[in-house]
Image: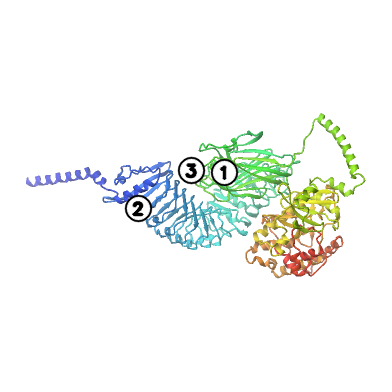
Amino acid sequence: MESAISVSKLLSLFLFCCFAFNAFTPYRSSAQLIPDHEVKILQAISSKIKNLNWKVTSRSCGGDGGFRNEIVLGNAITRNITCNCTGTICHVTNMELKGLNLSGVLPSEFGNLTQLKELDLSRNYLNGSIPTSFARLPLVVLSLLGNRISGPIPKEIGNIASLEELVLEDNLLEGTLPPSLGNLKKLRRLLLSANNFSGTIPETFGNLKKLNDFRIDGNRVSGKIPSFIGNWTKLTRLDMQGTSLGGPIPPTIANLINLTDLRITDLNGPTMKFPNLENLKSLKNLVLRNCSITGLIPDYIGQIQSLVTLDLSFNRLTGRIPDILEGLEKLDYMFLTNNSLSGAIPGWVLNNKNNLDLSYNNFSATSATSCQLKDVNLASSLSSSANSSGPWCLKQDFPCGGKPKYHSFFINCGGSEMEFKGKKYEADLDREGISNFVLHEKWAYSSTGSYMGNVKSDYIATNTFSLNITGPEYYQTARLSPLSLKYNGFCMLNGNYKVQLHFAEIMYSDDQTFSSIGRRIFDVSIQGRKYLSDFNIMKEAGGVGKGIFKEFDVDVNGSTLEIHLYWAGKGTTAVPDRGVYGPLISAISVTPNFEIPSKGLSAGAIAGIVAGSCVLFILILVVLRKTGFLGGKDPKDKELLELKTGYFSLRQIKAATDNFNPANKIGEGGFGPVYKGVLSDGAVVAVKQLSAKSKQGNREFVNEIGMISALQHPHLVKLYGCCIEGNQLLLIYEYMENNSLAGALFGRPEQCLHLDWHTRMKICVGIARGLAYLHEESRLKIVHRDIKATNVLLDKDLNAKISDFGLAKLDEDENTHISTRIAGTMPKEEFVYLLDWAYVLQEQGNLLELVDPSLGSSYSEEEAMRMLQLALLCTNPSPTLRPSMSSVVSMLEGKSPIQAPIIKRQDAKFKAFEMLLQDSQSQTFVSSTFSQESMEQRAKSVDGPWVDSSVSLQSKDDFSSSSKLIRDSSYV
């Protein structure tokens, strides 16, 4: 009995203990407290960061809500504070405070939270620098994405051995990358894009062998892409867009077999072949844009079945589109725009339902009946010589189907039709833009690209943040593009135009939130010339919602105007959301800087004009008779008066040149002296004076006025006008600040310029473009026939312009009232010696000996060989084998391959060429004499650019006739 009672008591005691344990468990939990010193740290952080709204106590980890814990928006956690509690003590270990618009200076007190493993402050408004105190923390994740953090990355960050993720994108960080980051052996993600880092990528980064995500877009890091990236074999994403890095892409990239995303764009340096990516079978997004890649698209691209995006735009690719690409079933986007792809456009491309852009290429044929087929952009995809029954917009450069007739257009980009200051701005409302060409009567736009991280981003912007926008209504909307946006004007009259581009940043807020810290940066080019580099609307306008316009004077010579906005990988890409970046434009205004040709008049107006003209004609006859122009004047004066060019009075020219002050004399040519002058409006000009002893004579003077005044091109010296008074015959040209190419290369030390390889390439391309215009594009087909260094002038930006058309010969005499019997000088001896020497070097495989030794090793041997081979091709003894100048331009730009002929000096063709030279020599009025002048005499003769084609014998010999100097004059 007693035993039973004892058992009953024990059971009751056990049940009581269980009840007591369960009943007091909450009280036991509430006793887990944050240490006082940590509470003070958290309170200090709270006092320094605005909008945090913390009420921190020692019990904040126990569910009292002091941290306002865990806020979830959509699927993204924006606030989450995690504590690790052991016994009665709790420590804060994880802090996610994202997108809360926290402001103030980034507190260094975070570095005193000794148990903190994750600190994520993404998309706030914090400023200051990264505290060195962070190096004391056992951090695994540190993310400061989308703030205003500035200064360098502290080298001490490299001491956080536990760090696996370092995300610093979209800030204002600067300086060089600390080599100590290479100590972070556990690092998996290193995101540095959209900052201002400079210098090279440290070699120590090759130690980061656990990296799976590396991004450095939009920084000014330089040097070549390091070969040690091949050590990052676990890498799944590599972004190197819009840096100052140079190619080629190292062959070690073939080691990155786990890559799913590869984006390398806008590389500096020479051309390169397509990198070997054959083993990268997991690629989903392959972007190699504007990397100067030449050659064919490799077939193995068609075997990467995981591909979703293929962007090879703005390269120099040639050949056909491989048919194997048709089998890429997951491919959604293919951008091949702005290459030199040829052959027929495959039928499978035209039937494709995906977004494909083949615009601006060199295809030879297509069955397409439209420039936009569903989501396939074919604008300007065919070569100008292609036989196609399709619409004109398929052809290169959008040739005008009839006679050019338009002289202005106005576009409200992204908005509806509106009127401003009497001008009707046309609507531009199409919301597509991935691979889109939209054609209007006078103009069209072509948009290319998909947004990273947000393929559903819009291509039209509206005033999302209800900004108080200043200026006209067209600033309320804008057209966007993630990559390339081109506007073209069609069938335009030749002449000079005023192009106004209007911008207003309307996609960022104007408050102190992370939505206001974005930086939109892009380039603006017109007619192929880059006018704005790294253009930032908000910076230029002084804030968001403020309208600003940029104005440019540009020439239209071929009936088409092109305005190109291009994203070169710079600026933020994740503020206020991912996918907000790229070109933005609000409106376009194009008006002529010339008098518009009049249209038809009424019968009454015509009658009045006829009557008035008769009276005026009689008066003119009387005046001309009295002044001797009828029957008493030299015929040359009548001829000059008929020429339609700007007229200057002798008084104006005397004032401009200080009465032809010898101090203003800048050259002496066959026509006579050339003077620098300053007109009353401040314009600087060069005045060429026809002398009585001119070897060329007045007829050549007439030729030059007639031909040059009809020609306008960026690479031709512009003739402003002439002066004809008494015996004074003067030509007024634009003034060229850097004189002649001869002076830059061979002149006196004070004249010589250091022309690096890039500049020399630019000069050669400029000369070729100018000649292509003369030969093929201008109404008057002109062969200059006296191209040499003295006839190539350099402006302030070292752009080449061809001068002196006094000895040019018109190909088509029936197209003009001007003709010449003679066309320049062809000094036989040095031409043969130079060719002879070049052929010897070609046979020996030593063509690079022709390269100027002053360049040292600072040039691309590949590009130099291309240029030298092209020179041999252009001097082929057989005229039928020489390329056209448009082909030369294409080859110089790397858009077409070069196959230089192998010609032996003893070949009959070469002998025939010598005979051709002899025959040509016998037809020249001014023969070339062969002299052996010294280098000193040669240098003295380079007084400036203003030397006519028929120069003095001394200067002619100095620049071209001495065999001793042939090597100098042939430098690339």
Residue type, numbered disc 3: Ser
- Determine whether 559 is above or below 185 in the image: above
Considering depth in this image, is 73 or 843 the residue closer to the camera?
A: 73
Q: Quadrant of residue 920?
A: bottom right
For the C terminus, which image quadrant?
bottom right
Horizontally, residue 294 falls left or right of residue 110, namely right
Residue type, numbered disc 2: Leu
Mark 2 and mark 3 in contact? Answer it, CB < 8 Å. no
- The residue sitting at the left extreme is 1
Residue drawn at (42%, 58%) of the image: 157
- Determine whether 867 is above or below 421 in the image: below
Considering depth in this image, is 499 or 779 the residue closer to the camera?
A: 499
Identify the residue under disc 1. Answer: 541
Q: Distance between the residues labelled 2 and 1?
A: 43 Å
Identify the residue under disc 2. Answer: 113
Identify the residue under disc 3. Answer: 515
Considering depth in this image, is 143 or 908 the residue closer to the camera?
A: 143
Q: Nearer the viewer, mark 2 or mark 1?
A: 1
Q: How far apart are marks 2 and 3 (CA)?
A: 29 Å
Residue type, numbered disc 1: Ala
- The residue sitting at the right extreme is 631
Horizontally, residue 843 falls left or right of residue 465, namely right
Q: Is mark 2 on a helix, strand or loop?
A: loop
Q: Is mark 3 on a helix, strand or loop?
A: helix
Sooner in the amino-acid sequence: mark 3 or mark 1: 3
For the N terminus, which image quadrant?
top left
Q: How far apart are marks 3 and 1 (CA)?
A: 18 Å
